[in-house]
Image (cartoon, grey):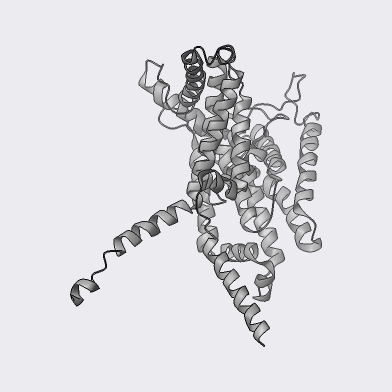
Amino acid sequence: MSDLNEVQPVQPVSRWSDAFKKMATSQVLTSILAIVVALVLGAILIAAADGDVQRSWGYLFSRPGDFFSALGGSVGSAYSALFQGAVFNISSSYTVGQFFAPLTKTIAYSVPLIFAGLALGMGFRAGLFNIGAQGQIILGATLCGYLGFTLNLPAGIHLVICLLGAFIGGALWGFIPGILKAKTGANEVIVTIMLNSIAIFLLGWLLTLQAFRSPGSNMPVSPRMAPTAQFPHFFGTTIDLGFVLAILAAILVWWIMERSTLGFRIRAVGENPDAARTAGMNVSMSYVWVMIIAGGLAGLAATSQLLSSPAQQLNIDIASTFGFDAITVALLGRSKPLGTVLAGLLFGGLRAGGYLMQSSTGTPIDIILVLQSVIVLLIAAPPLVRAIFRLPDPERERKAEARAHARAAKKEVAAS
């Protein structure tokens, strides 16, 4: 009997329970569910804007089949077009057209988002809310573009010089808020916002000068980049060296943050700057180095716009909205390199598929902006996602222990 009583077949159940608990409280699941909620809300908006759905709504109770048929048709066709434009074009009669064409567009749109997302993610982990990626991209594009259309160098050397110019331009624009933060305590949010505006107007002014103006053009655009400054392509597709550099940048950022002394200091400063300072770390210089590296990475985001074939021109809209979209990418990727790459591919796919969705179904591409905004909202508020799906709070045990210690301390004080 004693042997039977000692048998406790609860350990496997406990292991499964622990695994489920870890999965239910993980940040990855929260991010995935945020995307799911955004897609559901997007489906509601798509259906609400569809004329057939609106008409069938008027006689829903008499002929519900018409309503649900129109609902499924509008949402299904919109999301099908979104998928085909981003991943796999089912309607194409060629294998290359089916698979490579949509994916190459997704990758092309993701490259600047990955670079800028890595830049902002480093700042976030250092406790800095750097929202100046837009200005850093513009300065990187300005220096890269000038070197691209003025120099006459061999192909490999010219491309490297342009890449260095993009990094230096962005790093310079990141150094300014970094040194102001370190020496004067200036708020990096305000400084980077102002630098974004300065960068835009600076580029606009430069494009009015003869040195930057394309000969014979009345438009504020520069000459086209020299062929020797363009990225090479791979496998006969539009995938170029820019995507490879973005992946290498993600690996480098991972090594810096997780394996280097500088990364340890950055993470320590981000967790608790006062404790880091007490431990002998130079908090001010950590801020400066973070902003220099982050600015350089953001500057490299401009290379995908300028150095991709066919030859591009420097213009006032060269940065598009990549600097602001990268905030969403960094938040969704939890400021980690792998997460940032995946988030960049996701948002690149949304942008690539959004154009086909609009052209083939008439669904406004603004729906994509709504999806991105909802994802940011839910990522910034994990308790809201947990409340929607009734997930456990990962901090529940810690909070319970803190309350228990507080009650015990009160009892000791009352007893004394």
The relative height of residue 217 versus residue 230 in the rendered view (above or below) is above
Q: Position of residue 267 (x, y in %)?
A: 59, 62
Q: Quadrant of residue 185?
A: bottom right
Q: Position of residue 338 (x, y in %)?
A: 49, 48
Q: Identify which residue is drawn at 54% across, 61% down.
A: 396
The relative height of residue 243 versus residue 129 in the rendered view (above or below) is above
Q: Quadrant of residue 266?
A: bottom right
The relative height of residue 223 versus residue 135 in the rendered view (above or below) is above
Asked whether residue 245 appears in the rendered view, the answer is no
Q: Identify which residue is drawn at 75% across, 53% down.
A: 188
Asked whether residue 324 appears in the rendered view, the answer is yes
How many numbered discs sit on the rendered protein? 0
Quadrant of the rendering where the C terminus is positioned: bottom right
Q: Nearer the viewer, residue 295 or 1?
A: 1
Quadrant of the rendering where the N terminus is positioned: bottom left
Q: Nearer the viewer, residue 279 or 39?
A: 39
Q: Nearer the viewer, residue 311 or 353?
A: 353
Outermost residue on the bottom side: it is: 416
**In the displayed structure image, the side of residue 246 where residue 203 appears, left or right:** right
Q: Nearer the viewer, residue 29 or 396?
A: 396
Q: Position of residue 120 (x, y in %)?
A: 63, 48
Q: Identify which residue is drawn at 77% across, 31% down.
A: 211
**In the displayed structure image, the side of residue 171 where residue 408 appears, left or right:** left
Q: Position of residue 160 (x, y in %)?
A: 57, 43
